[in-house]
Image (tube, rainbow, N blue to C red):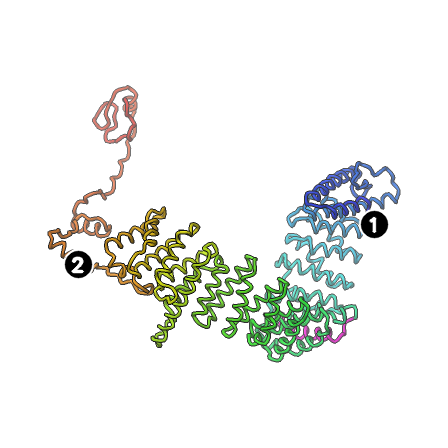
Amino acid sequence: MSGMHLSKEFFELLKAIGESKSKQEEDRIIQREIATLKKKMDGSSSKGGLGGKLPTIGHGGGGGGGGSGSHNALNQNRKKAKEFLVRLLYVEMLGHDGSFGYIKAVELAASSSIIHKRTGYLLCSCCLAPEHEFRFMLVNQMQRDLASSSILEICSSLIAVTNLITSDMVPAMASHVEKLMNHGSEIVRKKAVIAYHRMYQLDEHTVDRKDLIDVLRKVLCDRDPSVMGSSLNVIESLATVDPAPFKDLVASLISILKQVIEHRLPSDFEYHRVPAPWIQMKIVRILAVVGKNDANASNGMYEILGECMRKADVGINAGYAVIYECVRTITSIYPNPTLLDAAADAISRFITSQSQNLKYFGVTGLAAIVESHPQYATAHQMSVIECLEDRDETLQRRTLDLLYKMTNPVNVQFITEKLLGFLRNTTDEFLKEDLTNKVCTLAERYAPNNLWYVETITDLFEMSGDFVQQEVAQNLMTLIAEGSGDEEEDENGEEADIILRQHAVTIYANLLEKQIAKLPRLLLETMAWVLGEYAYLSEEFTLEEILNKLCDLVKVGKQLAPSTRKIIVSAIMKLVAQAGQCPPQAAKVIDDFSKAKDVDLQQRCLEFQNLITTAPHMLGEILPVDASCEDVQVDPNLNFLDLYVRQAAANGAKEYNKPDDDDDDDEDYYNNYNSSKKKPSAFKMTPYEKPTKPGTFSSASMGGMGSGSKNTFGTGGGGGMSGVTPPPGAYGGN
């Protein structure tokens, strides 16, 4: 505990928290600490606040601070006041409520001691929510501190302004912070720039963008490098939104960067022989934003970027970081072949490095180059593949993204094979989904031939069928059904389509040997459809063998989805039609599912049973071979029934005559009704008559109603109201 300046109680608290074995034990420790702090806070309140004699803050807690009024006791209490807030901060950091002590932080922020003031500001910054009312209690204190003659108080207040103010406080603080831009201390000017930018982010109406840009132009020329460096963050933030106001600063930024790389800055800004690497990287990033899609602005950057890359290559990490930012900037600005070659050369050294961090830099940088200049991908393809074998998971994922961007029609087979191999071994569900979408996109975009596409998508179905979209299965079936679609080379195209379908049938027939639980739903449905349509083309399997496999599949597949079961049964029916006979195994499947709970499946089986028993010769017409792409001919006049109608009429059947009062079509009904003025047969379509306005009750009628006489309305009786119809049930009963 030597040199830590901690009380014994505080040290024991930290030790207990570090040695706790579970979250529950940690929570119990913090709950005891909260109870102790509340007792001490109540005791300090009774003594007149933290400025008086704060009692000893310990786990043994009672009320003790003694009555001594010596200066030593007072100094110790001030120390305990600071420790009280630090312990409260630990309570908050570990997820418990310390709001009971916030007011003490506000009080301590007004202390004359800079240590106590900074501690109070720190706790308020970390714990007070943006909408907390205690933030407004600090406005006057921050204003007083900003106007202080002490640099330490000004800096503490500027840090508090950056962390504590809300949009409502900006008008009260803006003028005070703006004055500090011209302060004599460089550390004050630096912090004032940061605070002014924060106020602009909160309230753009109070801190105008134009005024902020003018301030930044002035600060960029500050004599102190640290103040100049603080403006770079703000310039990058504003230029990212709108680079136009900063186009004329390119020459100034290049001049500053040139001074930096020539070691003109004080040696305090060097890091392992690299001059001000953070300032270099920030300026390079600003140049990337300003020079994007701007040839004139980019022309002046080429020389300094190349020189910056050369001088940063000193063999340490800080230099590599500068080179990486230069590479990103080179790929963002208007392209220059010489710089692109230099960037690709630097990236190649990163990728082949033994350091995983540098490999990651190389892969990320090459991805930026390949995105806009894909010709640089070929030279580094094997090096990137080696990164995929690395055990670092982060590097693997970044390499997968790079491989996806590097893919072209030449290397699509090689890269897709690597992606599928990685997909086969991964267990990360999110990575599986991402890789599945990437492989689908690459296969559809760069497939060298249809056979490769069918094999690749089928392998993808097996590995991660649950993540494959329905559209992919539809595209696969459409490709198999329609083929290449070459109209110019009919004979060669037709032969290629037949080979494709034979190959697909062979693949899917072999897959039927696998366990059904390992095959996803979309793959099963695609297999059933392809086998039902093109099983007759197979040279390795007979129709009966494939039919038996499908029957076995649908019988043992109790976990099949209803849609999958329907497609398999439909495929069995197609194969029966192609074979011209219904084997016993298929007949049993149809019979079993004719009693299924699924109405659609039951109807299909019943219709097929009826068809095969009454008109087996029509199976070939109803379920034709390879007719999935045939257009369905629709006869709106039903001319195919003419022969049947004539035969029925010859046998004495009466012709159909449309009835005159047919109201199936409302428009015809109204037209006929208006033209012929015939009375409707079923409904009365005329509107109801408007009710008559009720008359005024007379004294005679009132007397008649209360006399007990049974006068009938409208009959001229003694107390009645003639011509008025009473509502139903108004006088029912008596």
Q: Quadrant of the C terminus?
A: top left
Residue 373 left/right relative to 477: right
Q: Which residue is mark 1?
A: 1
Q: Give x and y (percent) for residue 612.
A: 27, 55
Question: Of residues 439 and 496, which is closer to you in this image?
Answer: 496
Check residue 105 for magenta coloring.
no
Residue 340 left/right relative to 730: right
Residue 718 higher or lower than 1, as above or below = above
Q: Residue at x 66, y 58 (%)?
A: 199
User: Visible in this render: residue 177?
Assistant: yes
Residue 31 higher or lower than 260, as above or below = above
CA separation, marks 1 and 2?
A: 108 Å
Residue 138 left/right relative to 732: right
Please tell me in which quadrant of the rendered image residue 54 appears. Answer: top right
Q: Which residue is mark 2?
A: 642
Give the residue type that dot 1 points to. Answer: Met
Secondary structure beneath dot 1 equals loop
* Label 1 with label 2: CB-CB less than 8 Å: no
Magenta segment main secondary structure: helix
Question: Of residues 276 and 360, which is closer to you in this image?
Answer: 360
Q: How many marks?
A: 2
User: Visible in this render: residue 107?
Assistant: no
Highlighted magenta segment, given as a residue range: 246-266
